[in-house]
Amino acid sequence: MSNRMWGGRFAEGPDAIMEEINASIDYDRKLYRQDIEGSKAHVRMLAARQIVTPDDAKAIVQGLDTILSEIESGTFTFSRALEDIHMNVEARLAELIGPAAGRLHTARSRNDQVATDFKLWVRDTLDTLDDQLSELMQVLAEKAELHAGDVMPGFTHLQSAQPVTFGHHLMAYVEMFARDRSRVRDARKRMNESPLGSAALAGTSFPIDRKMTAEALGFDRPTANSLDAVSDRDFVIEALSCASITAMHLSRLAEEIVIWCSAQFGFVKLSDKFSTGSSIMPQKKNPDAAELVRAKTGRIYGSLQGLLTMMKGLPLAYSKDMQEDKEQAFDGLASISLALAAMTGMMRDLEPVIKTMKKAAGSGYATATDLADWLVRVLGLPFRDAHHVTGKMVALAVDKGVELHKVPLEDMKAVEPRITQEVFSVLSVDKSVRSRTSYGGTSPVNVRKQARRWLKALAAEKA
Ligand code: ARG
């Protein structure tokens, strides 16, 4: 049998393989709510513009509401022969209300319909990501405030560099996730224009009111070019690009968690709730949640690459290629959402091992820069000379197999005779972090201030 939605000129139905490659209902059924919402807005506008009668519009809206409850209660039968969510809904509408159902598709095409549905769905998803990012920021800032004064090694090249506080390290991620949030909000603003009424590609000869449907669906305005409107997938590509950057940030934090909770580092303890055991090695507690967050990054980037590649050669306007946007976007955006939830749970439960971190912070000559700064400040050495002198002291300490603050004063004096006992006051890790009061630096006072600033801003948003 040929398709009853478009089969007028067809004598034969599709080959089984054609149906297999063409049908999108198995995944685009996810858009049912947006599809029904869009159709209701459309038919109400058609009635307001006297393109359909009030009675037909009423029957259509009621029928659509019935379909919504059928889908939500699981009694709706989806059909692959009907290709996609749009035609599944419309066919059922015809069963429910008869020929009036055929009037719904006036001044509309599946091309503007799918763009509208998908935009509504992506918009909701961006709002969810926004909320999830702010929750993660909240958890991190709370933990940072609590540990504003707890020292850990700061690394460059994963080599001990200078002591920082655990709170400072966490606040670095708060800044990253705040930028991610602003990207999400920005993307939402840019994408919030309604494609509905662009019809197949050229607009329509019916006297429709696109502003009315835009407003009903919470869009800021209708799109200004019908060709662009039906062929634009920037909105989902941008959402995936936001997701990819966030995934990259999450993956860095996940990687740090994996390192920190290893026996060799022992900086943090993960809760049982976010780790797993080994079936053969009874001693193991593995950071699987962190590893999986790190791994999800691959499929999130993959969805972005997939869509960019799928779109790049398409002439205007719609091509069926675009149907391939959904599965990948659904997967990428579900993955980032899950990764955010897992990271938030993990970070909420994560306990730093303060003693171990502090001990590590004091090893690896991490206060060498403090020594050099002291030589500049107290003895008036140019920084380059101070750097050289300090280098010699470090070599001395390496020779003796001790940390910097354990090098005897006499040995230090042999390198730089003007050194006094006072130098030891800057060689402790606590002093080191406390001295870094420059704006944005790691001093506990700074960190506490930054954590509170963010907590206040997040609370103000909720109020
Ligand atoms: N299922 C299609 C999609 O997702 C809907 C649009 C179909 N339009 C068309 N002209 N065949 O892209």
Image: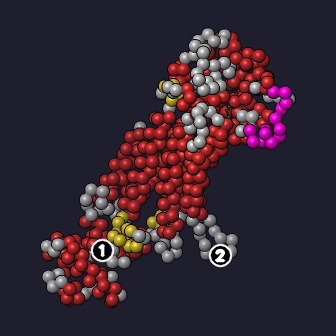
The image quadrant where one finds the C terminus is top left
Please, what secondary structure does the residue beneath circle 1 have?
loop
- The numbered mark at residue 281 is 2
The residue at 78%/17% (across/down) is: 98
Q: Residue 16 in magenta?
A: yes
Position of residue 87 measured from the top left corner of the image (x, y, whole percent) = 73, 29
Q: Is residue 332 visible in the rendered structure shown here?
A: no
- Is residue 274 positioned above or below 337 on the image? below
Q: CA distance from mark 1 to mark 2?
A: 39 Å
Q: Tag count in the figure?
A: 2
Q: Residue 249 in magenta?
A: no
User: Image check: 265 left or right of 51?
Assistant: left
- The numbered mark at residue 367 is 1
Q: Mark 1 or 2 closer to N-term?
A: 2
User: Image check: 175 left or right of 125?
Assistant: left
Position of residue 229 measured from the top left corner of the image (x, y, whole percent) = 55, 30
What is the three-letter code of the residue carrying label 2?
Met
- Is residue 358 positioned above or below 209 on the image? below
